[in-house]
Structures are given as structure tokens and as C-alpha cells.
Amino acid sequence: MGELEADEQRLRAADPDGLYLFMLEDYPYMMTPDHVAAFAGTTSQEIRKLLGRGEMQGCCIGTRRLVPKLELLNYLYKDRREKEGDANEEAAMRQAP
């Protein structure tokens, strides 16, 4: 499997409902805060705040902040994954002797 195919698989796995990937097709893989803001319907300043607080993962290249599509998808599904994780922990505790 090629590197590009592996990246595509990671993106599909990060968007299990297929809600966002088709809408992200026109954006570059490494998105600027302006790209993310346009996609999310918010401001680039708010995206920079999320990055600064560590709520959304990204990287800096020089003074420029960038957000990989994979990290945007992880952020969008974060609450759901946390709830699923809590539910899995509770189920495991109920099954423990």
C-alpha cells in the first residue's frame, strides 16, 4: 500500500460517518486557519485560539499555523469519541468480576 493510500484510509477512518470528507476535497491537506474558518463557518481568530489552547492540533512553519485535515476531523469528532470511550469504560467495568 502506498503512502497516499494510507493517508486516504486514515482520513476515511477519522470521518466514520462520511460527513466531512467530500466537503474538504477542495481544500489543501495542510489547511490555514483561514481555510478551517471558512469550512467551519467561524473566524480565523477563533481557530488560532483553539490551536493556541491545544484544543485543535496543528503545526507551525515559521510564523504560519497549519492544520492537517486529519486533525480537523479528529477535532470535529472529539466529543463523540470521548463519549464512546466513556461508554466502553463503563461497559468494561460492568463486566469485570
Image (cartoon, rainbow, N blue to C red):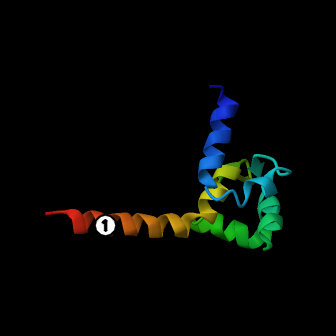
* Image spot of residue 7 (x, y percent): 65, 38
* Image spot of residue 10 (x, y percent): 61, 43
Mark 1 crowd level (few <14, some 14–19, many ≥20, 10 Å Cα): few
Q: Amino acid at mark 1?
A: Ala
Residue at the (67%, 33%) spot, across then down: 5
Q: Quadrant of residue 91?
A: bottom left
Residue at the (70%, 51%) spot, across then down: 69
Please tell me whether residue 10 is drawn above or below residue 94 in the rendered image: above
Please tell me whether residue 13 is drawn above or below residue 50 in the rendered image: above
Give the quadrant of the C terminus: bottom left
Residue at the (80%, 64%) spot, across then down: 39
* Image spot of residue 88 (x, y percent): 36, 63
Q: Nearer the viewer, residue 51 or 63?
A: 51
Residue 57 can be seen in this image:
no
Q: Which residue is mark 1?
A: 91
Residue 84 can be seen in this image:
yes
Left or right of 83 on screen, residue 34: right
* Image spot of residue 56 (x, y percent): 61, 62
